[in-house]
């Protein structure tokens, strides 16, 4: 089992998540991921400064605004936004980041690894939850 597979298993065992890039658009992955985590009984917080609420639940502008510290942050945003989110997650002591396909490039991965964070990239949480 490689490090990514180990991190997937560890992350799926943690029950408090934040989804950066959550959206009200039900056709987009930001919505599908947030909703599927909820449907699998995770405590999940949507993060997107464009929305006040998603499906009636409060949506937060960034990780600093959350009422609690999530154990895992799932990123469904472009690499440029991921870079900023890494710093915020690290400052808050969040050690698990899951970059959805397209959310990480080489620089993002190098930065997260350089900070000693546990990361997943290249794998989709929707698929992982189906396999769980």
Image (cartoon, helix red, strand yellow):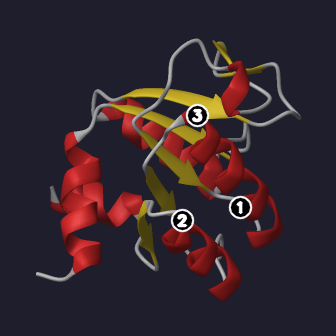
Q: Which residue is mark 1?
A: 82
Q: Is residue 72 above or below residue 16?
A: below
- Classify residue 80 by image quadrant: bottom right
Q: Residue furthest bottom?
A: 106
Q: Secondary structure at mark 1?
A: helix
Q: Is residue 56 above or below residue 64?
A: above
Which residue is at a point 57% across and 42% down the rendered structure image? 19
Which residue is at a point 65% across and 70% down the rendered structure image? 103
Q: Which residue is mark 3?
A: 92
Which badge, 2 or 3, is on the more N-terminal residue? 3
Q: Is residue 1 above or below residue 57?
A: below
Q: Which residue is mark 2?
A: 99
How packed is label 3: few (under 14 Cα within 10 Å), some, or many (20 or more)?
few
Distance of label 3 from label 1 (alpha carbons): 15 Å
How packed is label 2: few (under 14 Cα within 10 Å), some, or many (20 or more)?
many
Left or right: where does residue 32 sit relative to residue 43?
A: right
Which badge, 3 or 1, is on the more N-terminal residue? 1
Q: Is residue 12 above or below residue 34?
A: below
Image quarter in which the N terminus is found: bottom left
């Amino acid at each position: 089992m490689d490090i990514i597979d180990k991190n997937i298993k560890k992350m799926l065992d943690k029950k408090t998540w934040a989804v950066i890039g959550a959206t009200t658009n039900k056709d987009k992955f930001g919505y599908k991921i947030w909703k599927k985590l909820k449907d699998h009984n995770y405590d999940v917080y949507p993060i997107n400064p464009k929305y006040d609420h998603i499906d009636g639940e409060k949506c937060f502008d960034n990780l600093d605004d959350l009422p609690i510290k999530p154990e895992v942050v799932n990123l469904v945003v472009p690499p440029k936004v991921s870079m900023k989110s890494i710093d915020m997650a690290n400052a808050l002591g969040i050690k698990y980041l899951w970059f959805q396909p397209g959310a990480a490039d080489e620089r993002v991965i190098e930065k997260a690894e350089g900070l000693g964070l546990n990361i997943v990239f290249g794998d989709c949480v929707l698929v992982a939850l189906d396999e769980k």
